[in-house]
Amino acid sequence: MRNIIIDCDPGIDDALALILALSDLDFNILGIVAVAGNLPIQTTTRNILRILTLMDRLDVPVIAGYGNPLKREPVSASEVHGDDGLGNVDLTANPSIKVEDIEVEAFYHSMLCQHKDVEIITLGPLTNIAKTMMCYPTIFEAAKSLVAMGGAFDVPGNCSPVAEYNIWADPHAAKMVFKGFSEPITCVGLDVTRKTLLTPNYMEFIKTSGSPIATFINKALQFYLEFHWQNNRVMGCEMHDPLAVAIALYENIGKVYQADVDVICEGDAIGQTIAHKNGQGNVSIVYQVDRKKFLELLIGNIFPQLKEDLACMIDNPIYGVF
Ligand code: RIB
Ligand code: CA
């Protein structure tokens, strides 16, 4: 089984990403680590507990990470994700799940000492990773890989004309990780996450599964869709984090180029990611993605019972739309 750690700031799209990862029992999820980002740390931690309850995965350890970025003032995105971080839906956490009593640095150190080939997926600001690097400078040499949702390289940002949220929320952490993380990094930025929208027809399609997971997803996405329509005039939901999980866990849905990545940490361009495209570099930046393959993975893995009908949605020989 593949050893996976997910570091996230749920967040509606983080929630779908967690549901995707938790749906595949081939993955040994060593832990889900909360970081402040979309919402404060108390909320993001609670939301991991809520999602594990929904998925009936009370076996997965939950770790509370950092509540503040390394240097800049904290930010939040409740206007995107709701005050509760999951679209203000009615979803309670099973009181039997407890947050692990361990500091985030000690958790990463322990997991990387105990397990081989640990794949780390970050879906929020990189604060926890940077703090662990500061505490244990060589510990990530024991990791297999890092896939990070973040950055905007050849497209506008979503927090400013140049900055993407996860980087903007903690630019000093991102700079440290992109420069100093010892293992291969794959960066899934807005360049591709805006190309894999989940549109209302697919939200309706998911409902036909009749499952409580589908009910939660649709309620949470209703809030998220409203934000996209009101603010971006797009009738669809950006699947930032689910795409990062899909690229991390399933092969061949994206194309990359190699670069070194720098991050602007001060001034009007704070959070901008600069790719030095020199054909080598330690960061694989995803620049192209197959939306059909992504939707098949996302919906087919969460709702296997829909796989047959999904094929009609995606490749309908008569209507040609999807
Ligand atoms: O810019 C999008 C990213 O910021 C996503 O991970 C979203 O959940 C927020 O964390
Ligand atoms: Ca996120």
Image (cartoon, helix red, strand yellow):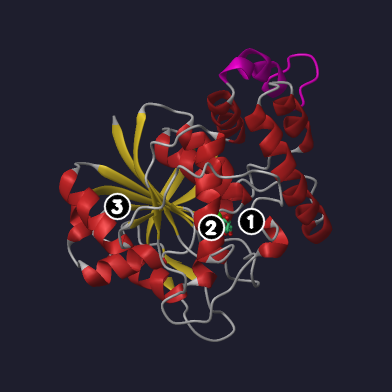
Viewer-side residue, 281 vs 184: 184
Name the quadrant of the N terminus: top left
State which tag comes first along the sequence, 3 or 2.
2
Task: Indicate left or right for 83 with 179 as reference.
Answer: right
In primary-sequence order, the first of circles 2 and 1 is 2
Q: Is residue 289 left or right of residue 65?
A: right
**Secondary element at tag 2:** helix
In this view, the residue in front, 287 or 220, is 220
Q: Is residue 46 magenta?
A: no
Answer with the quarter of the image where residue 39 lies. bottom right
Q: Residue at x 20, y 67 (%)?
A: 137
**Label 1 is placed on what type of residue?**
Gly
* Label 3 vs label 2, nearer the camera: 2
Please determine whether, in this image, residue 211 is positioned above or below residue 32: above
What's the distance in space between the residues labelled 3 and 2, CA to CA?
27 Å
Task: Label 1: state its secondary structure.
Answer: loop
> In this rendering, would 130 be left or right of 235?
left
Q: State whether residue 94 is above or below residue 142.
A: above
Q: Nearer the viewer, mark 3 or mark 1?
A: 1
Mark 2 and 1 residues: CB-CB less than 8 Å, in contact?
A: yes
The residues colored magenta run: 304-322
Q: Earlier in the sequence, mark 3 or mark 1?
A: 1
Residue position for label 1: 85
Q: Which residue is mark 3?
A: 184
